[in-house]
Amino acid sequence: MRTLAERLIWAREQKGLTQAALAKLSGVTQSTIGNLESGLRLSARRIVDIATALEVDPVWLANGGAQAKPGAVEVSEAATPPFPSMVRVRVGDEPDTIPVRRVEIKLRAGFTGFETVPEVEDGGVLHVPRTVIESQKLTPHELLAVRVRGCSMEPLLFEDDTVVIDTGDRQPISRELYAVNWKAEACVKQLVHEGGQWYLRSMHPDHPPVNVRSGECEIIGRVVYQPGRVMKGRF
């Protein structure tokens, strides 16, 4: 089974569920199930919800590889990271975690800095393995867990994916990923330095690079982690 659609159809039929029944069980709409089975890739959060309802490994459902035991949530060794500078983190190997606040970033036009609004999902925190915090020499109180908005960073990041940003690391480095304030809008972009100028680069081909001189741009923090993988190095 080479595609997400094939794996989803197989897993749903193994459970004896219709699209409507799976939608109700997973808390998503039937059209979401239909779109996925038609080959449309949606947000990682929806995929996790569906995988939980089907009692399969969400990483297997999304990327393939060896399937985990029903109900287990772990990263398959056969699932290769899509970008070489990412490092897979096996969930469950290190039960000792550190909570990172889940927030929504609020910005105001014409003002520097930012405000945060707590999110209540999962108790308002993201549990990050302590080994990740220590190996990357991160300071917990400077970390924030935020949601990715829009599709401009696909296929690296999908809408509603959660990433952790280090607000203490705002030094621009070419080809690193950052959460930035771009014209009073919080977004995740790659910073690229070319020809003596800085650009905001998206991963999706429909979104061309933007010269930061064309508008206000302020770094909020560097992207350092996404559940299941460390984000480091230059992309």
Image (cartoon, rainbow, N blue to C red):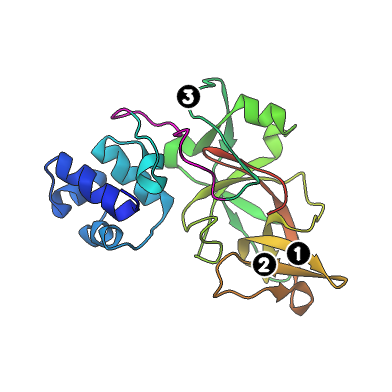
Residue 190 percent across, percent down from the top left: 68, 60
Res. 184 image quadrant: bottom right
Say whether disc 1 or disc 2 marks the residue closer to the N-terminus: 1
Look at the image and give the residue range highlighted in magenta.
69-82
Residue 58: x, y in percent? 37, 41
Q: Residue at x 63, y 47 (%)?
A: 84
Residue 2 is left or right of residue 158, and the answer is left
Residue linked to disc 2: 201
Q: Is residue 195 above or below residue 58?
A: below
Judging by the rendered image, the residue that carries numbered circle 1 is 192
- Kind of residue at badge 3: Gly
| Disc 3 to disc 1: CB gap under 8 Å | no
Query: At x 28% / y 29%, what residue is drawn?
Result: 70
Q: Which mark is residue 92?
A: 3
Query: Which residue is painted at 68% across and 63% down in the image?
Result: 181
Say which amino acid is labelled 1: Val
